[in-house]
Image (cartoon, grey):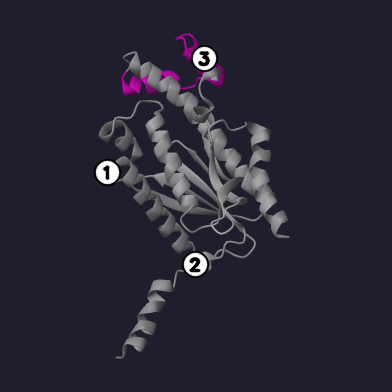
Amino acid sequence: MKFDQLDKKMRVFETASDLCVLPGMYMVARLDGRSFTRLTKEACQFEAPFDVRFRDLMTSTAASLMSCGFRVLYAYTESDEISLLLDRDERIFGRKLRKYVSTLAGEASAQFSLGLGQAASFDCRISQLPNVDLVVDYFRWRNEDAARNALNAWCYWTLRKEGCGVRQATRSLLGLSVADKNELLFRRGINYNDLPRWQKRGVGLYWEEYEKTSIDPISNQSVAARRRRIRTEFDLPMREEYAEFVRSFIIQPQTQGA
């Protein structure tokens, strides 16, 4: 059998399950660290509940995903996850889901591992969202998840550092309201409202334009040019302000391209 015939015969088995995202649909990729609890608490012994070193590894990984060939409008990271909003008109790989999932997971795993100095891996999934409101709701959802997890983490690790075991600390938090948990911390000298917002609300990354001045080698004159760079925001707005913040990244590119 000639190669062309063999290639055609076998290729169908590889592509039979290919799914493509429909035109006009927004894609949001969410990447999660695999077994990161063991990695952060045992293998690397990062500070609990939050460690700036781990935060910086996650933000640098998110930045690399924004620069690896995809048209990413906004990236958001909290805990061990990264969410990426892709341009609605992104057409790389023919919008094949398997290509997005495998490439993004591989890129994140490689970049994080290089920064950490040991092997780490991410999985990836894609949400297909038909309108702007659902995209905004997606990021509000992850933002609120960050807030809930941060409060729980601070309470849990505060109890653990007082000598409570895993079960005792976990049981102590069962049934407590948000107010109860804030009070638990306050009685121990921790004002939750004063903690850094990146711990409670995550970190956002987006493209910003700036003016760069250089010398024209021919005229030897100073010239200015517009460039793009990634901005990292550690102090994200909250609730409705955050919704409008996210919405600005969705609406603006479409307006500029109209």
Q: Main secondary structure of the magenta part?
A: helix
Placement of 200 over or under 227, stated as above or below: above
Q: Which residue is mark 1?
A: 118
Closer to us: 14 or 77 = 77
Placement of 41 over or under 219, stated as above or below: above
Closer to us: 137 or 248 = 248
Which mark's residue is nearer the viewer, 3 or 1?
A: 1
Residue 93, label in figure: 2
First in sequence: mark 2 or mark 3?
A: 2
- Amino acid under label 1? Gln
Residue 166 falls within the magenta-colored stretch: yes
132 left or right, relative to 218: right
Placement of 19 over or under 66, stated as above or below: below
Q: Which residue is mark 3?
A: 191
- Mark 1, other Cα within 10 Å: few <14 / some 14–19 / many ≥20: few
- Amino acid under label 2? Phe
**Element type at marker 3?**
loop
First in sequence: mark 1 or mark 2?
A: 2
